[in-house]
Image (spheres, rainbow, N blue to C red):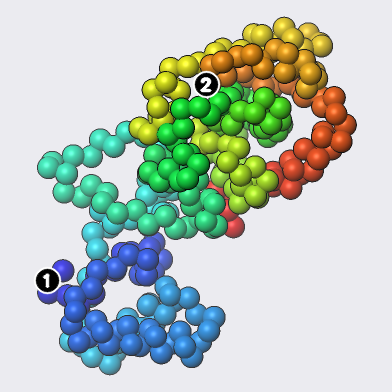
Amino acid sequence: MNATDVSPMWDTVAYNAGFIALRPTPLAIKLYLIIRKMTQEYKSMDDQGSLNRAIKRLRNQNPAFTMRVLNRQSFLSGHAYFEQGGRMLPRPNTCDPSRRPNCPIVVHNNWIVSKSAKIYRFREHLMWLYDGDNRYYSSDTRNYITYRNSNGSAQLAALSTALAMGHLLDRVVILPTFICGGGNRTRRCPLNSLIRISRLDSSFKDRFRESSFLRHPKVPDVVKRSLYDGGAVLRRGGTTTSDVRITSRQLTKLFAKVSARVLNVGNLSGVQIIFDDKSEGEMFKQKLQQGIRRAGYRQY
């Protein structure tokens, strides 16, 4: 951008105010003075709207103002990288900058609503490294439970069952991938394609992890290697032969003594947890009702 005043990222439909390169030129400074005046005059105007209007105004006022959009293959919006790029779930980065100069360098995590959903998507794609005070990734003492989805129509019921099992066994639920679409368009997708992440986060804060969690480099090997396969055990412990109805006491008896860090309970289709403590069961049901709300990928 040696010959330009301003180089913003392109955001599919407009210039992106979230990532922009500036040179300390008089016209770049003037651009931001115009933006500041606009946002002071119009309180409802956001940063992206003011940037685009200011660019248009400055171009009309001063033909010497120069601007060039950042490389669209290297600097991408959330829409371009995740949706247009077909990256619903993480995949290996095979782009070699020495051979392909247009490899992604910056991804703006936009075109998705809420802080919770943005963090969830970055975590799902192994783009998040912050461990936090709770050692989100690096704890070697926390216990987990995993399961899998095989039926698209029953996967939210399976999610509810997994959360109930996690609650009763004091294990954090590692989510599977989910099934989206229908017919020939069925594909694997992340949870934000189905429900509102901010609502789930408010009801089950720190009680679930993204599907790629065990692939994260900060997760200790002692956790990744400590696996107990309890799917068959769960099915045998149920009270029916087809669907499985199991009480909280039965569940605890089956798995409370499992020392493995990761308990895999397999396919939860048709599995139902019955709380022996009715008041506890009612409280948990209310948490599920508050936390599981339908939403689309962008969480609008």
Tell me which residue sits at (50%, 41%) in the image. Answer: 134
**Residue pointed to by mark 1:** 2
Identify which residue, 51 or 26, lies in the foreground.
Answer: 26
Tell me which residue sits at (61%, 28%) in the image. Answer: 171
Figure disc tally: 2
- Mark 2 neighbour class, 10 Å CA radius: few under 14, some 14 to 19, many 20 or more: many
Task: From the viewer's perspective, tell me whether residue 22 is left or right of residue 202.
Answer: left
Identify which residue, 19 or 12, lies in the foreground.
Answer: 19
Task: From the viewer's perspective, tell me whether residue 3 is left or right of residue 231.
Answer: left
Quadrant of residue 268 within the rendered picture: top right
Residue 294 seen anywhere in this rendered image of the structure: no
Task: From the viewer's perspective, tell me whether residue 104 is left or right of residue 127.
Answer: left
Quadrant of residue 252 within the rendered picture: top right
Q: CA distance from mark 2 to mark 1?
A: 54 Å
Q: Which mark is residue 261?
A: 2
Q: Earlier in the sequence, mark 2 or mark 1?
A: 1
